[in-house]
Amino acid sequence: MELRNSTLGSGFILVGILNDSGSPELLCATFTILYMLALTSNGLLLLAITIEAQLHMPMYLLLGQLSLMDLLFTSVVTPKALADFLRRENTISFGGCALQMFLALTMGGAEDLLLAFMAYDRYVAICHPLTYMTLVSPRVCWIMVATSWILASLIAIGHTMYTMHLPFCVSWEIRHLLCEIPPLLKLACADTSRYELIIYVTGVTFLLLPISAIVASYTLVLFTVLRMPSNEGRKKALVTCSSHLIVVGMFYGAATFMYVLPSSFHSPKQDNIISVFYTIVTPALNPLIYSLRNKEVMGALRRVLGKYILLAHSTL
């Protein structure tokens, strides 16, 4: 099969779900609404956590980082997909594809690790409340955040460089929403079996190990909550933890399907739907799941919005 050189001047064609859908206009409108919802909700949550002193706690610092990751993650993918559909122009340069892959892997990997650290935070807060500020001090919290970003960036650089140096066939049509490793491997004109094994090992390490830590943390939390004498305390703990588990289930389920299941289980249509779930749907729903079920966050959002509304009226 004829090969094309991997040069920065070459480009790919992204054939995402909008191009394969039976009603692309409706899907485009849905993606636009979800993206605007993600921008607004994550932006407001970040603003409230930054401004409100009441939310300057480790739990909300981690939540703010989750909102930042979601905001950046969906912005790496959604605007490009919508613009391509509206312009009927689905090309992406070789360098643009590499950059999108690196950013998506970084945001996804960082969120993956952060969710595990958030489970540890909830475990300490509920099971060891007297030592919470020692075990999860602001310094420890920032170490967690830095670890998430740095490890994810290093893994993303390695995978992006290796993937983009593969020899690709003449047809550079990526049947996927974004430049991601699994669909790009299907275009490679070289034996990728060893690299697929590396991806599998990385997926198990980066996904299944954090999932195991999360399950262990919440199992211990559940035992502690069930022994609580106060019904109000038990209800508050269950609400906080259940919202986190919903986010964990949505994110890890989609990511595990993409990066842990063998390629024989994948099809372009399924991969497109799964990618939409963790790049567009989840970032829009995460802040709603956390804020609507948290009285402190809702109260802070009301105060922040109230201040800005009063400021806007006073300037008129």
Image (cartoon, helix red, strand yellow):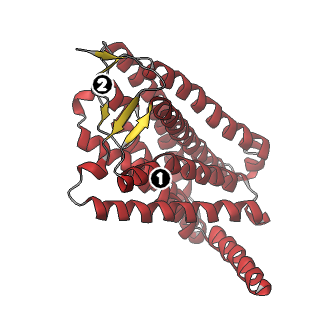
Vertical placement of residue 261 versus 41, above or below: above
Question: Which residue shows up at 35% across the image and 28% down it?
Answer: 184
Determine which quarter of the picture holds residue 14. top left
Q: CA distance from mark 1 to mark 2?
A: 25 Å
Question: Which residue shows up at 30% across the image and 52% down it?
Answer: 18
Q: In the rendered view of the protein, which quadrant contains the N terminus?
A: top left
Left or right side of 257 for 83: right
Look at mark 2 in the image and give the residue it sits on: 187
**Residue type at tag 1:** Pro
Q: Is residue 242 visible?
A: no
Mark sitting on residue 313 = none
Vertical placement of residue 191 versus 211, above or below: above
Question: Which residue shows up at 49% across the image and 50% down it?
Answer: 74
Q: Please state the horizontal and vertical placement of residue 215, each as a whole percent of the image.
A: 47, 43
Left or right side of 47 for 279: left
Q: Please state the horizontal and vertical placement of residue 21, each as a whole percent of the image.
A: 24, 54
Q: Crowding at label 1, few (<14), some or many (≥20) Cα neighbours within 10 Å?
A: some
Q: Nearer the viewer, residue 140 or 185?
A: 185
Look at mark 1 in the image and give the residue it sits on: 79
Q: Is residue 262 visible?
A: yes
Vertical placement of residue 247 versus 162, above or below: below
Q: Nearer the viewer, residue 313 or 54?
A: 313
Determine which quarter of the picture holds residue 22. bottom left
Q: In the rendered view of the protein, which quadrant contains the C terminus?
A: bottom right
Question: Which residue shows up at 37% across the image and 65% down it?
Answer: 29
Q: Crowding at label 2, few (<14), some or many (≥20) Cα neighbours within 10 Å?
A: some
Vertical placement of residue 153 versus 132, above or below: above
**Residue type at tag 2:** Leu
